[in-house]
Amino acid sequence: MRITTIDLFKADIPLKDPFRIAVMEMRSAMSVFLRINTDAGLSGYGEASSFWKLCGETQSIDLAAAQDLAKLLINQDPLAIEDRMADLDGFLKNNSQIRAAFDMALYDILARAANLPLYQLLGGSSARPLRTCLTLGINPAELMAEKAAAAVSRGFQIIKIKLGTNAKDDIARVRAIRSAIGPTPTIRVDANQGWDVPTALAVLTRIHELDIEYCEQPVPYWNLQDLKAIHTKSPVPIVADESVFDHHDAFRVLADDACDYVNLKLSKSGGIRTGQKLASVVDAAGRLCMIGCMMESRLGLTAAAHLASSMNHFKFFDLDSAHLLATDPIIGGMTYQKDLCLLNETPGLGVTIDAAFLEKCPKITI
């Protein structure tokens, strides 16, 4: 089998509402969809979700990089994923988000060729429940409380609250949401690097009584000393997110005992291949993983769900970004049953992209 052509699509998907976190605001998901085509009639799909303030990639950067990367793959064997990704990783050290899109598409082809759903090819099971949270962007406390109550009424049992502004307002947000949803639903918080050590400890100490499952990335990604200081003193468990892109980062953060858990995102790791390595490092350290998302459509989320279903040490799931999108261009793949993420038995990722949507997307073929 040989790769014949690769199609790149500039895919802009509007959000239902502006989505604000501590370091940026988004009004649309600016993705790059790609399709790797082969002489065997099989095609594989991938998605890069540009999140520039967290990963340093814009949609334009990803489209430019994708053209260079695609040229490395033409006339190559798509089933030799180790070699193909070594080619891409060796050519481009960073740009994990667009490398993840190629990785997803190659694994999609491999599993389609094997006539197996990807999770099964990777040794997993669809029987394991993946219960996602619903994430609330930063807004006034009253509005966030309303949105949280509405999410719980729709069947979500876990609410993730974006924080990272100042102690007074962030504490008020968490209190308002707990009051609105009652004592049973789980609450997680994510500061997206927005605090310093005193602010983080002030907030976490005050909200601990509200039964908070964990806090993601309280301080800037590079400051492992402060991350460790918070982890040592915080009454709330700490998750490393932006501090961990790949397995090398995971080893460094865990060797320094700077967190309780690690958030793995395919867009940060560069895809499934490196994601497996990262998760194995976390497992070797005796810790647990969560699997998260940027602003992917159900295409990228489906790939993440397949990986999460293939390794038992994923404990936390944040695969909700499709709920934030105003339209859904994906056919097949992962579906939602209230807050459960469900995979089917279709070979590969089991996805295609709506042809009418793709017709509206600028396209480049290599």
Image (spheres, grey):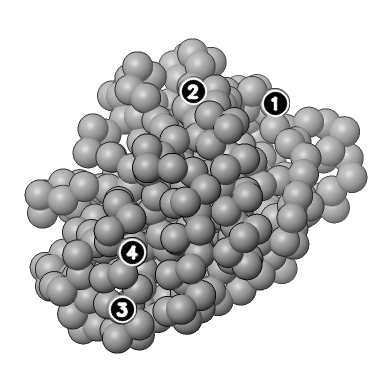
Q: Residue at 16% x, 46% y: name it.
A: 283
Name which residue type carries label 3. Ala
| CA–CA distance in space, label 3 to label 4 | 9 Å
| CA–CA distance in space, label 2 to label 3 | 38 Å
Q: Which of marks 1 and 2 precedes in the sequence? A: 1
Which of 284/191 is in front? Answer: 191
Label 4, residues with CA under 10 Å away: few <14, some 14-19, many ≥20: many
Q: Which mark is residue 202?
A: 3
Q: Which of marks 3 and 1 precedes in the sequence? A: 3
Q: Residue at 21% x, 83% y: name it.
A: 225
> Which is more foreground, mark 1 or mark 3?
3
Name which residue type carries label 4. Ile
> Which is more foreground, mark 2 or mark 3?
3
Q: Position of residue 241 (x, y in %)?
A: 36, 63
**Mark 2, residue position:** 342
Horizontal relation, residue 253 to residue 347: left or right: left
| CA–CA distance in space, label 1 to label 3 | 45 Å
Q: Do the residues bearing badges 2 and 1 touch, measured as CB atoms within 8 Å?
A: no
Q: Which of marks 3 and 2 precedes in the sequence? A: 3
Q: Which mark is residue 331?
A: 1
Q: Do the residues bearing badges 1 and 3 touch, measured as CB atoms within 8 Å?
A: no
Instruction: Indicate whether 81 appears above or below 268.
Output: above
Q: Do the residues bearing badges 3 and 4 touch, measured as CB atoms within 8 Å?
A: no
Which of 341/59 is in front? Answer: 341
Horizontal relation, residue 236 to residue 295: left or right: left
Q: Which of marks 2 and 4 precedes in the sequence? A: 4
